[in-house]
Each structure stands twice: as C-alpha cells, then as structure tokens.
Amino acid sequence: MLLDLENAPVPEVGATAPDFTLRSANGHDVTLSSYRTQKPVLLAFFPLAFTSTCTAEMCAFNEDFDAFAATGVKILPISVDSTASLREYRAKYNLGVDLLSDFRRTTSAAYGVLLEDKFYSKRAYFLIDTDGIVRWAHVEEQTRDRRDNAEILRRIRELLD
C-alpha cells in the first residue's frame, strides 16, 4: 500500500495544529495533543541530520537549552531520518533535546512542509499554544536558512505574554 504524501496546506496562525504521534530518538512515542493544557510546543522541522545547517540549528538549541527550558515551551525537533540515525546524531552532538522521527513523512506532509521531490522536509517552525492552536508559523524558503534562537525566543515570549 502506497502512502498518500501529498502536502496539506501549511497550518495558518489561529488554526488547530494537526495532531501526530512520532517515535523519538529515545524510543518513546510522542503525541502532540498530549501537551494540550500542559505546555506550549515549538515544532522545529529540519531536513536531515548530519547536514551543516541542521547541525548548527540543533547545536544552537542545545546551547540555549536553559533559555528555552525557562520559557516552559517543549521543543520538538522533527526530521525524516530514522530513529536509529537520530539516536546517533543526538549522541554525536550531545544534544539535550529529543528528536522525533517522521520516517514515513506523514507529519511533514500534514504540515505542508514535505519537499516531495526530495522526500525530506523544509525547515519550518510552528509555535503551538496549550489549546493546540498555531500561534506562529514560519517556513524557510531555502533549507539552508534558519531562524536564530533570539527570534524564536522572542516569539515564545510574545505567546506567553
């Protein structure tokens, strides 16, 4: 059976975030809706582990781990890499954030960020409040581009104010 991986539209600010369950590099299933009423979530789609921009981005999240933790927002980086690859990637760079595997590409497609011709996702960010509503969304035009943590932290503070 072939999966239908046609992209849905990118969720707009004010829309309910598409729910998902993905396996983490730690081997646990993570369901987005389990954070409702608990804490806001930042979804950070990244194309591929072990690439330069993705590594810089994940290491930056790691460097600012305490600043992100202080906001109470759960960061969920998502990649199409396998859980085994993400486990190795996380260990190699000693990353404090867990990484989620969208190996089947269904979550990337549900968020409208799957590059169907390359079979990996665009770099994209979705800040989701405790009601499961998208409060900020940004999709990079080029996969080599990324938001810096200062901007992301500013967006988080705006949500929490």
Image: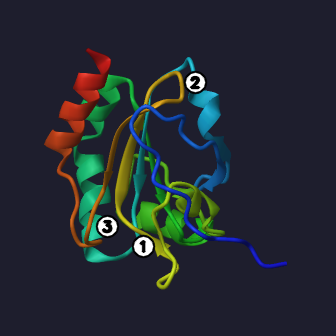
Amino acid type at circle 3 is: Cys
| Residue found at x 23% / y 53% | 60
Q: Secondary structure at mark 2?
A: loop
Do tag 3 and tag 2 residues touch (Cβ < 8 Å)?
Answer: no
Please state which amino acid type lies under the numbered disc 1: Leu
Depth check: 92 or 43 in front? 43
- Above-or-below relation of 121 to 23: below
Q: Which residue is mark 3?
A: 54
Disc 1: CA contacts within 10 A as few (<14), some (14-19) or many (>=20): many
Q: Earlier in the sequence, mark 3 or mark 2?
A: 2
To which residue does mark 2 refer? 36
Q: Which residue is mark 1?
A: 48
* Residue 62 image offset from top left, x and y in percent: 30, 48
* Residue 142 percent location from the top left of the image: 25, 72
Name the N-terminal-most of marks 1 and 2: 2
User: Looking at the image, is 82 positioned above or below residue 29?
Assistant: below
How many angstroms separate mark 3 from mark 2 (CA)? 28 Å
Q: Going by the picture, which residue comes out furthest to the top? A: 161
Disc 3 and disc 1 in contact, CB within 8 angstroms:
yes
Report the residue at 85% width, 78% height from top: 1
